[in-house]
Amino acid sequence: MISVAFTLAAALSAPAGLGAPAQPSSLAAARIGSDAPGSAATVAPDTPASVPDCGELTCNVTGSAFVVAWFGEEPAVAALRIGRTPDSLGEDALCDDRDDTPGCGLEARAHYVTVTGLEPETTYYVQRFENGRPAGPLCRVKTGAVLRPRLPQTRYGRVVQDDGVTPAADTFVRYEIRGPRGRSAALCDLVRAEDEGYWVLDRGGVRTADHAAYYTPRPDDVEVVAASAGAAGLRTRQSRLAEANPLPDIVVPRTPPGSER
């Protein structure tokens, strides 16, 4: 199974949900049987030095949590297994945030898994699965430092299909601040069916790329918001920091029939 990485590499040159919060998966997730659709097969161990960073598969990295989000070519049941070493991935499968079936059972193309209950400034190894088979290589992500809360700065907008009206449900957006001096770490939000196409994020929580401190925007920085369009790639919008909410709509290709089950 080939997965489409959610990348913002060309976002700066590209043209241009308010529903209930996602329910996170924790390390105490229920164990699933090996015959379940979302069951994760055994993965051969790697050495820490050979494991690449998860990079733009991850977002919302804090001192105790992170999100892994990706878009598959075909509908599939997604799951994660994580551990502190490559050869000690947990036996518990972490399911998609929308998945309320026992032992992972939601079939979708857009996959969004929140992992909580983690230690700060700690490296974790992550294996993604689709229909019980590895979806891409093992990768690693390091949690950030514990930071004092800041006042929220809400940013929101909408993702619509290419008719310009119909909400684009069951996708996700990725948000960064970029400028001549660098870029922030990424925030992301899952757009559920009940959100009517809206995404909402807290700009006050944006961190530096190493997740060690809050990112301080500069006047010449811009906000880049991208929505995954699967095989069609990304659809992005740039906005000035001072631009009022809601930010401009992001238009993505229409979801093929049967892409979510």
Image: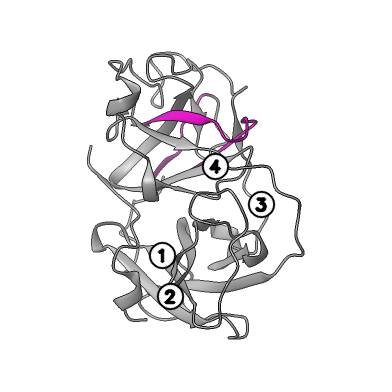
Question: What is the distance, in whole Å, between disc 3 and disc 2 at their CAs?
Answer: 21 Å
Residue that badge 3 annotates = 21
Q: Amino acid at mark 1?
A: Ala
Front tag of 2 and 4: 4
Residue that badge 1 annotates = 227
Q: Is 257 on the left-hand or right-hand side of 214? A: left
Assign the magenta stretch its main secondary structure: strand
Residue that badge 4 annotates = 66
Name which residue lies at 41% across and 20% down. 36
Q: Is residue 60 visible?
A: yes
Name which residue lies at 62% across and 66% down. 203
Residue 206 falls within the magenta-colored stretch = no
Name which residue lies at 41% across and 75% down. 180
Location of the C terminus (image quadrant): top left
**Chain part drawn in magenta:** 103-127
Question: What is the distance, in whole Å, between disc 2 and disc 4 at their CAs?
Answer: 24 Å
Disc 1 + disc 2, Cβ < 8 Å:
yes
Q: Crowding at label 3, few (<14), some or many (≥20) Cα neighbours within 10 Å?
A: few
Q: Amino acid at mark 2?
A: Ile
Q: Is 228 on the left-hand or right-hand side of 210? A: left
Question: What is the distance, in whole Å, between disc 4 and disc 3 at their CAs?
Answer: 15 Å
Q: Amino acid at mark 4?
A: Phe
Badge count: 4
Disc 4 + disc 3, Cβ < 8 Å:
no
